[in-house]
Image (cartoon, rainbow, N blue to C red):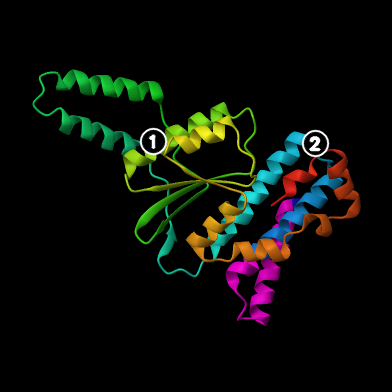
Amino acid sequence: MMNQAIEQVKSNLADGLLQKYPNLDRSKLFMLLQYCYSVVSFEYRNIVWPYEFMAFSRRNGELWERFCKAAWDHSQLPNLYRIEAPNFSEVRNNFRNGIINYTHGNQFQDKIVADIDSIFELVGEINMKEDEMFNLNNTNHIIDFKSGFGSNEKGNTLRLLAVGKAYKHWDSNVELLFLVRQNENNHYLEKIRESNLWQVHCGNDAYMKIDELTHAGICEVRQQAVDFKSDLSPNFWNYLVKNNLHHYLDW
């Protein structure tokens, strides 16, 4: 209920500001409003139920991702549009048809294809939906946002590698981007980088990549507006510092 109420206020503010100031940069306006939404959401959630480590980390990741995605919501680029995730069956069929073509005339083709089908049955369905999926200049782009990359990320690493390989079978020219809020790297992040499937961008580089893709101006909004220490109440900020949670708000 609380988040719905805040969302409604954000929507009303956007409508009112655009009516009063029709020449406002829509992209920057909606990113700024999304940041304001994050401040209020953090603050009032903590009043109702004080944050502990896991809840704050998770919520920070959700809100940071939504802040980044706002760059696509009102991008003015005419050659940019969002796309739907492909069904994994498309990937499976493309792979299977390729094997059939490669093994044409091979006496063991039926056995090879049957073995491939068995492998796909073991793998099961791979969820191809990612955080941001769009086409820019006739090239498909897939983005996975990650607020922080901790030391226990084996499962997420394996998922990303599997999804990346699946997308390359779907479209060999697809651009796969892994955008990470924090600058610190670790073994699992380097494993993703070294896979040569995903382009990895961390910290400031991640924001620069978003601007390169959208021309939305997220770097400017970040530099001129994002300041949680000043925008959150002193009591809440002190609570975050005391519990060593404030570093998550280094957006």
Query: Is 17 within the magenta?
Result: yes
Residue at screen point 33% across, 48% down: 173
Query: Is 170 within the magenta?
Result: no
Residue at screen point 48% across, 60% down: 213
Compared with residue 206, is residue 211 higher up or lower down, i.e. above or below?
A: below
User: In this view of the protein, can residue 163 be seen by the observer?
Assistant: yes
Q: Position of residue 67 (x, y in %)?
A: 63, 56
Q: Quadrant of residue 152?
A: top right
Q: Is residue 142 left or right of residue 145?
A: left
Q: Position of residue 234 (x, y in %)?
A: 90, 53
Residue at screen point 72% across, 52% down: 3
**Closer mark to the observer between disc 1 and disc 2:** 1
User: In this view of the protein, can residue 33 be seen by the observer?
Assistant: no
Q: Secondary structure at mark 2?
A: loop
Q: Is residue 16 left or right of residue 70?
A: right
Q: Position of residue 129 (x, y in %)?
A: 47, 43
Q: Secondary structure at mark 1?
A: helix
Label at residue 52? 2
Compared with residue 213, is residue 102 higher up or lower down, i.e. above or below?
A: above
Q: Position of residue 72 (x, y in %)?
A: 53, 60
Front-lying residue, 36 or 6: 36
How crowded pointer 2 is (Cα within 10 Å; few <14, some 14-19, many 20+) is rated as: few
**Magenta region, residue range:** 3-30
Front-lying residue, 52 or 4: 52
For marks 1 and 2, the one nearer the N-term is 2
Instruction: Give the residue number, with chain letter if any, for mark 1.
Output: 165
* Circle 2: residue type: Glu
**Magenta-colored segment: predominant secondary structure:** helix
* Circle 1: residue type: Lys
